[in-house]
Amino acid sequence: MPESGLPRYSLTGKEASVNKSTPTDHTRSSSLRLWDERTGPEMFWLSILSLILLAGMFHINDRPNHLAVFNGCLLGFLGLYPAYWVDCFWAVRLGSRDGGYHWLYAIFPPLRIGAKDHETNHRIWLPRLGWQSIGFELERRIQQGLQVPMIVMSLLILPLLGTEYFFSARIGDDYQFAALTAAASGIIWSAFAAEFILMATISQNKIDYCREHILELIIILLPILGMLGTVQIGRELRINQITKAANLYRLRGLGIRFWQSLLMFDFVNRLLNGPPPKQLKRLKVLSEKKRDELQQLESRIQRLESLFFQSAAEAQIAPDSRRAA
């Protein structure tokens, strides 16, 4: 009896430990929710900091007298990685439902600015708003909330480009003046990058958003090309031409950003579109046009479906005819 009781006691202990380490869906959701509440705000601000440090590296990498600042930004950026690795570890341990994006954040921390929650993968934490459900309503609110700050950031590009053009010699000689221009460029770039990451996250179709905002994406990626100046490939690509192209795209981006932001103001919309009767007439014409386009799309879908079903039926009939033969 003692011998049979000992393994029975051991087996029961193993079963209890297994049952204890395998939480139910309710326990799992509670654990994920608790982890989100504890880490969501902190990881958001850490991601903002990582983006600023990355901007510092991008905008001073070609200035030898700022090597100490570059190294400080690099060490600070690398020093943030353990926090993301811990977050990724607990996400895996608790069974995160974020679609595996925690692995991407562990590789490139700034992308966590637009991270969804681990529990539902349908919520996002934002300053002053807290946890919000992702949808068209949130997208509209964020666009309206960011329009004025982004107009200000867009307008700051003009004096910055003027300073870089007219005082290029002083930027090369004056350490503090060069540091100020680099800091201003980094802050503006960080603002555009953070907005792009956030809006791409909450948009219903990320590929369509990137396609519609391809110019902004180019502006964000151009500083990465600037870092090529520190290696041989950068010399082959003539980094000066890349810098000129970057300034050109920034000016074009400024115009498009400023125009899009103005259109979001109601009074500008009324000024451009005319009085309400005129707007109503134009919208009716546009509605008819869209309705015709929709009918054409539906007819194309029907033709493709009929071709698909016809080919599938022929493929099914062919083996039957061979068997009959």
Image (cartoon, rainbow, N blue to C red):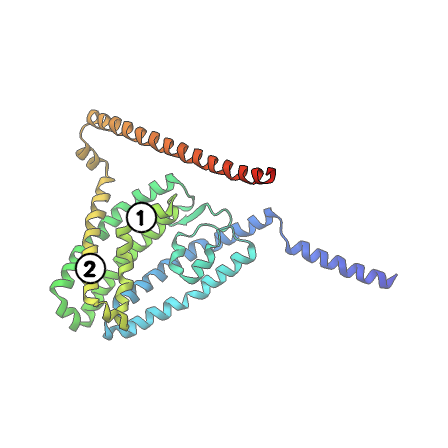
Q: Residues within 10 Å of mark 1 (few under 14, many from 20)?
A: few
Indicate whether 154 appears above or below 322.
below
Q: Is residue 90 left or right of residue 298?
A: right
Disc 2 designates what residue? 245
Q: Would you identify the image quadrant in which residue 295 lies?
A: top left
Q: Residues within 10 Å of mark 2 (few under 14, many from 20)?
A: some
Q: Is residue 197 left or right of residue 121?
A: left
- Identify the amino acid type marked 2: Ala
Of 99 and 30, which appears nearest the observer? 99
How many numbered discs, if any? Answer: 2
Tag 1 secondary structure: helix
Residue 255 visible somewhere in the drawing: yes
Quadrant assignment for the N terminus: bottom right
Quadrant assignment for the C terminus: top right
Disc 1 designates what residue? 211
Point out residue 294 in the picture as x, y percentages from the top left corner: 34, 31
Point out residue 323 in the picture as x, y percentages from the top left corner: 60, 40
